[in-house]
Image (spheres, grey):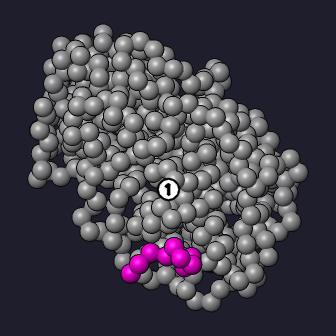
Amino acid sequence: MTGICCDDIAALEMVASGYRAQGGTGMKRPICKVLAISGVFLLAACGSSSSNSASTTASTATTTAAATATTGGAGATAAGTSVAGTTTAGTSASATTSAGTAPAGGALTPASAVTGAAPTNLPAKITIGVPLDTSGVAGAAAVGVDELDGIKLAVKEINDTHFLGANTQLALDVIDTQSDKQKAVQAGLQLVSDKVTAVVGFTLTPSWQAATPAFQSAGIPAMSVELAGAGVVDGGDYLFRTYPNVSQIIPQNDLEFVKFYGAKTAAYITQSDAASAASLATVRQKTLEAAGVKTVATQTFTGKDTDLRAQLTAIKDANPDIVISTPNPDLISLVYLQAAEVGIKSQFLGAPDVSDAILKAAGPQMQCVSYTTVWNPISTASANPHFLDYWKANGTGKNPDVFHAAGYSSMWAMAVGIRTADSVKGSDIRDALIKIPNIPTAMGDMNFINERTAPLKGTKVQVQDSKLVVWDANKPCTKS
């Protein structure tokens, strides 16, 4: 998931070059390298499991402290104030609530997307194949494990509530693709051979792009979990995405920030070896320049760099009104720590996927940084309150993060499609998904009517006193 917002296009170069997590070295580099990416799972009809798949229990991946920091770990991505009372209206949940764990007051759940009689044509067992990176590149493995935990939570709820019918259960068939593109492709081909019913996600965008032609050709609906770059659904009408292309969201919100701050000039510091970060930074710069914001400095660095002072000093000397920072999550704190060292006083517009660990590492040097996040953890909108309650009662014990929320939401979206279709035939599920008007999820309200892409817009947030709060133009931030 991204250099930015968990988009993993950058992973192609990193995996190809033997990218691995590296410990923090050099001045004030508190967080190890992590590439945030997204998870995958596939749906197979009863009896069609992959011969080389792992057991239903996901293999435990050894992760670094850096992976924990970036993906949430003991402290998930925090948010302060929820979006002002924006609980999405919708049909109340049917009588499919988990015993002992249902939220009070009839809160929206993903099951609220459907009403009427339970399906009658589904098999007794629908196997969900999960070719997921739970080992290999540390950052990918950490994210894959979290997304798998979100998927497992959704499957538990779907089965406990008999959402797919009294006699139909989902089962997980986990394949560790080891952060390897060819292993992911092989897993996908094997599951096509096994006549899987649907695919949801892939940990790496290059793996998704390499594997999805086979799914499209076979008529198997495929849904990415958390791929945030461009091109995810370009391969055909069986491809769906739950996570937005952040290049269509963040630059537009940058314009609102710029207007508020009255910025006339901007400088850019970008991680150049992360394709997703570089691509997003290009769009951010073009968007602001088109709005009349003059570029006064453009600086880049790589994931191997531990000293950014020369680049940041050049930015300081250019004296911009704002600085647009677009690194991968593991380098976020480094940028702000060293920006403070060289004396930059300009307003920063940052990148998403800021965890509690990143906030702690950066400390007061991130004060007043503003940016856009796709998932607001304590939002009261859509089914997020239900997800948080259900996670607290049934999750792993960690604070929920965006990867948990994405895995949970994507699994539920596909389950709603299957129930609506009352079929495991690919074309039926595809046709059902593009007609469903609304699916309440942890990520927000989803539908796949427009280009098979969920219309998630993100939330503008700001760091205040080492905590994230929803950005409010009427409550300006004060730097120390």
Magenta residues (range): 97-105
Does 423 appear in magenta?
no
Residue lying at the far top of the rendered structure: 310
Label 1 sits on what residue type?
Ala
Q: Main secondary structure of the magenta part?
A: loop
Residue 328 falls left or right of residue 299 = right
The residue lying at 57 percent from left, 78 percent from top is 99
Q: Is residue 328 visible?
A: yes
The residue lying at 55 percent from left, 63 percent from top is 394
Residue 50 falls left or right of residue 197 = right
The residue lying at 41 percent from left, 24 percent from top is 30
Residue 296: image location, x then y, percent: 21, 21
In the image, residue 413 sits, relative to residue 329, either above or below, namely below
Residue 326: image location, x then y, percent: 37, 31
**Mark 1 Cα shell of 10 Å, populated few (<14), some (14-19), many (≥20):** many
Q: Is residue 204 visible?
A: no
In the image, residue 366 sits, relative to residue 194, either above or below, namely above
Q: Quadrant of the C terminus?
A: top left
Residue 151: image location, x then y, percent: 61, 58
Q: Quadrant of residue 294?
A: top left
Q: Quadrant of residue 170?
A: bottom right
Q: Element type at marker 1?
A: helix
Residue 201 falls left or right of residue 173 = left
The residue lying at 33 percent from left, 36 percent from top is 359
Residue 75 falls left or right of residue 310 = right
Residue 345: image location, x then y, percent: 15, 24
From the image, tell me which residue sits under label 1.
405
